[in-house]
Each structure stands twice: as C-alpha cells, then as structure tokens.
Amino acid sequence: IIKTEKVVIASGIWGPLMGDMAGVPVPLMPVEHPLLFFGPLPEIQGTDELLVYPLLRDQGNSAYVRDTGRLHGGMLEWGYYEDKEPRLVDPEDIGNPEKTMISDSMRYLDLEEVAEPLEKAFETTPILNELGWDEKSSFNGLLSVTPDAGSLIGESPEVRGFWLCEAVWVKDGPGCARLCAESMMHGKTQVDMHAFDIARFYPAQKEKEFVKTRSFENAQTIYTPAVHPREPYISHRELYVSPFYEREKELGGFFENEVAGWERALAYKSNEQKLDKYLEEIPVRENEWDRRHVPYEIANAEHLAMSDSVGMINLSHFPIMDIHGPDAERMLEYLSIAKVGGNTPEGRMIYTNFLDEDGGVHADLTISRLGADRYRVVTGGADGNRDWVTLRNYRDDMGLNADINIRTHDIATLGLWGPQAKNALGNFVDPNELTIENFPFVAAKNLTLNLSGGKKIDVWASRISYVGESGWEIYLNNDSEEGLALYDSLLEVGVVPVGIETYANSRRLEKSFRLQGADLETEYNACESAIERRLVKEADFHGKAAHLVHREEDPSAILCTMTLDNLNASGEGDRYPVGSSPIIDPDTGEVPVDSKGRRSYSTGMSYCPSIKKFVVMGYLPKDIAKQGKSLSLEYFNEDGDGVYPMTVQIVGKGSLYDPNNERVRY
C-alpha cells in the first residue's frame, strides 16, 4: 500500500472501473472504433520516407484514411466512426476473451458492420482496394465518449484527493495533462475549466443509464459534419420538471432546451396568434440553419410584450443553496468580490462573483442575507454543481462551521417582469408592499399571496432583474398545486408566458449582461470583464491581491458590445448568426490577438428586438477596443461571402437598452 495525498486516474476506457474502486462515478463509455489496415505501401518499402500520403478526412462517410508511415509497416489505416448505431461497450466487458484480440482494447472486427461505408471508401480512395485488406492487423479499437462530449478533468466531488484526467484523446493529451497538473499544483489553470471540470456533472448525470444514453448520442456525432450549436439532446428528457410544466405544455411550450436535467420552454406556441401585433416588427429568419430548433419570431414577440406589459418566465432550473452556521458569513465574505457580510442588512440580495487566485472570474451568482448567520445562494443552472463543490471545498479546507443545504428541488422559481409587473402582482398582495419605498431594488422578503379561488401561498421574492425590466424573482414551494395556482392566477390577470430564449439571449444581450461560461471565464479577470466594483471592500477575499494589481494596470483585453451593420453581407439574404464566431479586424484581415495570446471570438450574440439590432459580445485587445471601431464577424465564410461588418458600440460597462437603468428601478 502506498499512502499519498493525491492520486490521478488517467486510464482512459478503464476509467469507470478505476473510479468504482474509490466510490467515484466516472461518466464515460467506451465505444468501438473500427480500424482497417491496407498495404503495405510500395512507395515506403525500402526507403527512408516516414510518410507518403497526407491525412484524408471524409466527413460525409464518417471516416478517414491515414498513412501510418514506415515506422508502422507502411500501411494505410482506414478508420470509421459509426454515426447511426455506435457500439458502446460496458466497461465490465473490456477484456472479454471471447471478444478481445492481443490487447484488451483491441476487439474482433466484424467486416459486415462496416461493409457499406467501406464500399464508399473504395470509391473515393481506390488505392485501398488495390493494396488489399490486412485482416490480421485490423480490429475494433475503443475510444472514450462522455454525456456531453467533453473530457473529465479535476478533483472528484465524491473523494477529495482523487483526481481525474479522463476521456482524453491523443491530440488533446498534452493540453489536458497540463490542465490537470496546474489544477492539482496551483488550484488554477491557464484555460477556463467549465467545459472540462468533472464537477460540472450533477449526481443524476452520472447515473449509468444517463451516461450510456447521452454518450450514445455524442458517439453518433463524433465525425458527422455540422452539428448545430443549439442541437438538443433526445434521451433522458424530463429528468426534472417544474410545478408549472403541465400548464406550459398546454400552452405549447417549445421544450427544445434543458439544462442540468431541467426542462425549459424556449417560447410558447399559444403566443403566436396572441402576440401577432408584434410579428410585423420582427424579422423572419429565412435561412434554415439560423432558425433551427428555436421559434425566434414567437420568442421575439414575447420579448416585446414583456417591455409593453408584463411577462413571466419559469426559472426553476436555478440551483439554490441555503447556507447557515457560525462561519457562514466568514466563508461567503472570503469567496465573494462584493461585500455580503458585516453591516449588510437582512433582506438584501447581492450580485457578486467568485475569483480564482489570479483574479479570473470563477463564478457569477447572487447571495441574499436571510439572517445574522443565514444566507441564500442562487446561481446558474449549468454552474450549480461546480459552485456547490467550490463552497464545500473552501469550507472544509478552511475548517469552517457552516451547513450548505441544496434546495434546488424544494423551491420553484418564477420571474415576473415588465412595466405592469407591480400591478399584476398587486392583485394578490397589498400593492403598498410592492412600492419602491417598501420593496426597493435588490431587496428580498417574504410575501403571502392571496390567489384566485381563495388559494393562499407563502413566497420569498427578490426585486432583481436580468431582463432590463422591473419586477421580481418569486420563489415558492416546488409543489404542483401551489405552482399551478400561482401560474394560473397570473395568466388570468393577463401576464404573458415568456420562454427562456428571451431571458437568456435577446433581453440579456441588449443589456450587455454577462453569462458565466460564455462572457465570464477564469481566462479573463474582473477588470477585463468590466464587472469590477467602484470600490474594493476592506475584507480579504480570494483573488484580492491579483484583483488589486489588475485595477492599477491597463487591461490586455476588454469585453465589448458590438452590433452588426449589415446582415446581408453575402448578398443572398439576411443571416442571423448562431453559436460562436471569429471576430476579424479589417485592417489586418486576421483575428485579433491580445498581449496574453487570447484570440477574439463572439461570446454571445442575438437579435434584440427592442433596439432592432443584432448584438454581439466579445473580448477585444485594448488597442482596438474603441467605440466606433469597425470590425467584422466571420460566419459561414466559404468564398469571402461570410464576413459581416460590425461596429463597437460599448467598451466595458454599459448597455444599449435603457442605458441609465431607469426601467428596472421603479
């Protein structure tokens, strides 16, 4: 037995078996990867040539041809990725003597399984047929796939000191090893970890059936071209639903989206006719790719209806943690860039961030003071488990006395916003309780709502807004009876159901609100992200020393808000970009690179109907982060026809919609 404080498993397809030994679930599935060899190549035999042919990728056939070179016998390797029925392998079946050749990761190949794509390969690369198939050398290899197609790196949430560097393919090996080593040695990495961190998975997403079905879907898309950025998963849906879900389905909710297992409606079919007066103001996306999976016209109509009247948005995917105990204040004060303890009054909600040691932005959340030693943390759906692990680890490492209770499945959340939000909610509570004097911005308190039909429910409400309109986040028991009573009562007084597309994209971006994992990452510090506070609190906090240095120096890059000048740059119709795209400096024709070597890409973009502009956010090097600077966005640029001119509108803080924030504070 060797005793050690840290151990790393980097065992690839054997990862789940290694994890089981320590009680750590490793969400990974091996999948068969047919490898057929042809040759040897006469051009290599008897020569000093290492390679003769370049790598050939045939995306349409989900295959490639690779010259293995002189060192491997001068064979041509044909590799195939099954895109219809990939063959997953139970980790327990690795090494099955009836299926295995000379190595556990080399399984017998059935030629019939690849007959059709191989025939196509003979047509495109006839040299394979000419060389002849080497049956003895051919086999099914094994690759690692995961439920979200990302690698698994970091300390396991279940066992401290048990580290993973798993689901890493050959080309990613050095980089992933570096991330793991940096995290182990320094507690921080040069590259943001949100897409790799093992802690991103919630417990339910590490259950074997979930891992199997989602990994199967990702195995289907290993090599197939053009996977859409908004492509939804099909398997393991309705893992979690809110108490409003049945009514949302009746309203025609477009449930093409889920996060952390929670179903979220992008928009509602029932609004198509109800809000038809807005449709004349909304552009129609003619290109199928630009509108795939999202009913943008309805979502944009919901966006405008909220600004005119009042809308409600199901936010029950919010991770919620209640923290209490003698050291609750000390822990949260140390982690937060904003002041949350001291003389912070009870009933105050604080927007804040956690930083890493270098001042990079690790988390983006709100903390509300419920009592002297009681707090509520609310964060984003994709970040909840990572944030919980961060809180728990710091508590344990600092030896603090604080309980962290996960309340996500106990509490449902409904956002109510718009100029008529106060009047709508005032139907069910004394309107005087809702005035700006009695319920100011960033306040949070308990309310008793007298709903339609005599139903009475207790809620906790916070006056905060991520949509640029006045209103509340309403937190209630995750109970279908209470939830439907509230939802139906609001429908009766004319509140418009609004989908998450409006909340997370069009309304957020016209306000230039940041999103963790997109606009906010540890690769950029708080000053570059333009979320630094006017003053630095006296209390120490994690990353404070670095943050103080950043405040005194010029940023290498800064987060900017831009707008596209011409959506029809190709001359073939307006395009509405989706996903992430490179930003181009027309003066150089290249992607700008800042002094730290970071390239400029869009971090978020959407058409914003209130301002009738297509908004793009992204980091720009300091020397070109200038208001009015002309840039371009590259989108499906095949022959120079996919370069869309855009202009920098805001450098750092600010917003294009209601720039003085008058609408959220009345």
Image (cartoon, rainbow, N blue to C red):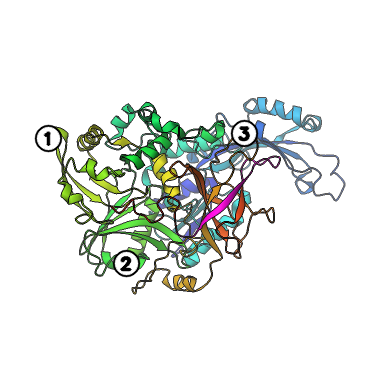
Please name which of the two marks, 1 or 3, marks the residue nearer to the observer. Answer: 1
Is residue 487 rendered to the left or right of residue 561? Answer: left
| The quadrant where residue 111 appears | top right
Side of 246 relative to 576 (left or right): left
Viewer can see residue 305: yes
Specify the amino acid type for callout 1. Answer: Gly
Closer to the chain start, of discs 2 and 3, is 3
The range drawn in magenta is 634-653
The x, y position of residue 314, in whole percent, is: 32, 40
How far apart are the alpha carbons under marks 2 and 1? Answer: 41 Å
Check the image and name the residue furthest to the right.
46
**Residue holding disc 3:** 108
Cα separation, mark 1 vs mark 3, equals 69 Å
- The residue under the point 74% across, 44% down is 68
Is residue 649 on the magenta stretch? yes
Q: Earlier in the sequence, mark 2 or mark 1?
A: 2
Q: Position of residue 7 (x, y in %)?
A: 47, 60
Q: CA distance from mark 2 to mark 3?
A: 62 Å
- Residue at 30% across / 58% down in the picture? 367
Residue indicated by mark 1: 454
Question: Along the polypeptide, which appears first: circle 1 or circle 3?
Answer: 3
Which structural element holds mark 1? Answer: helix
**Mark 2 sits on what residue?**
339
